Image (cartoon, rainbow, N blue to C red):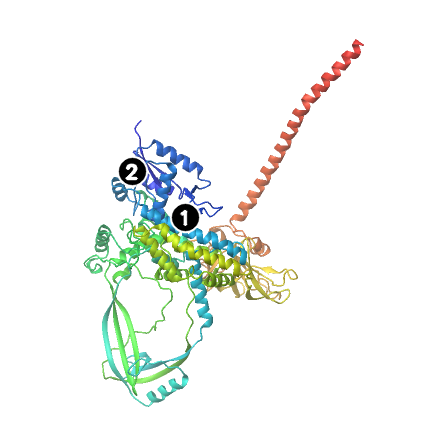
Amino acid sequence: MAKTNLVIVESPAKAKTIGKYLGPDYQVKASMGHVRDLPKSKLGVDVEHGFQPDYQPIKGKEEVIEDLQKAAKKSEKVFLATDPDREGEAISWHLKELLNIPDDKTYRVTFNEITKKVVSESIAAPRGLDMDLVDAQQARRILDRIVGYELSPLLWKKIRRGLSAGRVQSVATRLVVEREEEIRAFIPQEYWSLDVDLERIAPNLGKFKASFYGREKKMELHSEEEVDAVLAAVEQAPFTVAGVKRQDKLRNPAPPFTTSTLQQEASRKLNMTPRRTMSIAQQLYEGVDIAGEGTVGLITYMRTDSLRLSDEATAAARDFILGRYGQDYYPGKARTFKTKSGAQDAHEAIRPSDVRLTPEDIKKDLTAEQYRLYKLIWSRFLACQMSPAVYDSVTIDVESAGYHFRANHSSLKFSGYTAVYVEGKDEDDEVLRQSPLPDLSEGERVALAGKQKDQHFTQPPSRYTEASLIKALEEKGIGRPSTYAPTISTILDREYVVKEGKNLRPTPLGEVVTGLMKEKFPDIVDTAFTARMEERLDRVEEGKDNWKDILSGFYGDFEKEMQAAEQDLERIKVPDEVSDVICPLCGRNLVFKSGRFGRFLACPGWPDCPHTQPIVIEMPGRCPKCGGKILKKTSKRGYAYYGCENNTNKDEARKCDFMTWDVPVKDNCPECGHTLFKKSGRGFRKPFCINPDCSLFVPEEERGYKKKTATAAAESPAEGAPPEEEPKKAAAKKTTAKKTTAKKTTAKKTTAKKAAEKKEPAKKAAAKKTTKKTTKKEEA
């Protein structure tokens, strides 16, 4: 029997896609990620003998490893086709070592995109394992293991159990903490704005608003007295058009996505967490079943910091743009983008594998989240190869008493790339929206028709969002594309940081841990040090540095800091985070606590006062029953539900029993004006009206799941399971109870049977003895 070739990938989805392309001569199997790693129960690194790692097979992977060993033994060639990055290279090396694959049978292949053409070309041109990549990953893994396994026990001992520290997560936490310190230390500065309404001397020929600009240079108005001085001067002087400037302004498209910018944009536009974004992107990369096409990898590899695009991809984009939008929408040649310095540039930017597979054409084959993310990637890529948008920009300067006022207006003249895609922003720009400016000429007189002065105060810097924190980490050179999502997940899981809406705020625990790290381990939380370490790991990858030298240079100082911290530090108490919610039993301010189902509010007077309650968050919209605020609450089991603020009102006349599992949205029903709701869950959900008197009312049975009645919800919201799970859980409990009863009955029968079987020989023996005695008596 002829030997086949074995291809080992990381996931079953990728195995399915690649297996379809390669045919019967190749057997494609999945390693299910890593097959061996450092042990969880100990450090697993011999720091005294050259930082020798103790790699062990991962528990629970025995069957996978055994299956791969058998397949590798029977195969003529073994192609290691794990992900095309450091970690993927390391997984391939671990597979070779663990499966004992001979060098002459080992072939390394990578796929930047999983299409038939790329897969076939890669298999036809394999390479050997790149040990520089493997060593860079080993250095990162061991460095993080040393920091984590030596620092974490110190935090457990000095602060509390369950904490962790790490090179990247500790720096990310520090950024959030220091931003909060900036906000607290911020002193608002007063400033004023001054707008004037101007009109042409001839009536009905056009009004417009102009804002105070300054004299020869731009000026700030810091007090009302300064504003009144300007007004006093201009009210007695004529207004004359000092200049009119008209020009076409070009706006160029944003570059294609890297890992960082994809996570940022998905957070802004799709409200996806970085971890969720990468999970969905992985699915699109590995392959999705498309009707008429089979399993297709829809995007290129999603862990990249490069802006490079292949000639083949830009040519395909050109043909698509010319065919769908026309000559005006193509800039004449392919756009190229410069990758920032320090980037690894190992792969292309993130783009669709085939631009002809439009999001609309394959929407029916994708989940809601897959569709939305694919559309984002597809649109951004296509837009980056299109003509710039053209805006008709008009600026009018008006002069009076030596002071200048300025009016601006911009209108879209040619859509260009904006026909496909517009980039999101972390913060909305405040734009003065007004009608197009009248057609004025230089030297023309205009009349003062009105004035408006407003007091303002400067605002503190905004808290980080997940998107802006990723941007900051990238700009400072902290971490690499594969680390952003797990870093943010870790600092949230450890409760160093909490999310309030989209904003990240440090907890007292996060501040205490950061303070300790800054005092005792300044290098670990130093952004410059962490960035330099990333650069040194890059040098290992390039073959310029030895990975053990990096570890040796780091460990000496780190060990001294550890010993000093052990001796100097006393037990540190984390202060309670006080809320503005008053305890209904004793009147004290409740504090935030953590439990198995997350954070909750508790009275600081425990055990004298045992009161606890879930954390509530004010939601958009108003209660459809009484008009009160809608609050998001968390049940004892950790499920979210929504209720009126008057649920617990002691005044029976004002008490409201409105509760729902549906999520209120900011939009109101166009028919009745009541708040709209949407079904809970990930991905886009179409809002609906729950007002039974409205013509757009959607009954409960048509909202996607059966719901509890309002009474039932009011009676047991704290038991909190999603409504569609309640009957299932009840049925499951009944079934389980029946099975348990049956098992007990069976067990009783089995026990009785065994006991009977044990008694039977005893009875027979007793009967024999009785017979013998009788016989002896008879003989006597």
Q: Which badge, 1 or 2, is on the more N-terminal residue?
A: 2
| Quarter containing the C terminus | top right
Residue nearer the viewer, 550 or 117:
550
Give the tally of numbered discs.
2
Closest to the observer, 331 or 15: 15
**Outermost residue toward the right in this view:** 780
Left or right, 125 with respect to 533, comes to left
* CB atoms of marks 1 and 2 within 8 Å: no
Q: Find numbered disc 1 in the image and state the secondary structure of the residue it sits on.
A: loop
Q: Tell which residue pokes out farthest to the top in this image.
A: 779
The picture places residue 273, in percent across and down from the top left corner, at 41, 56
Residue of label 1: 51
Identify the residue at horizontal 73%, vertical 17% (top origin). 769
Decide: few, some or many residues near mark 2? Use Cα within 10 Å; few <14, some 14-19, many ≥20: some
Residue 681 visible in the picture: no
Measured Cα–Cα span from mark 1 to mark 2 = 41 Å
Q: Amino acid at mark 2?
A: Leu
| Disc 2: which residue | 22
- Left or right placement of residue 23 versus residue 171 in this view: left
Q: Position of residue 435 (x, y in %)?
A: 31, 74
Residue situated in front as seen by the camera: 317 or 486 = 486
Q: Can you say whether 404 is above or below 55 in the image?
A: below
In the displayed structure, 580 sits above or below 374; it is below
**Relative vertical location of residue 15 with respect to residue 152 in this rendering, above or below:** above
Q: How far from the left and from the top, in percent, is residue 65?
A: 41, 37
Q: Find residue 633 and name its label.
A: none
Where is residue 544 drawn, in percent x and y? 30, 52
Q: Is any part of residue 93 visible from this angle?
A: yes
Name the amino acid, label 1: Phe
- Give the quadrant of the N terminus: top left
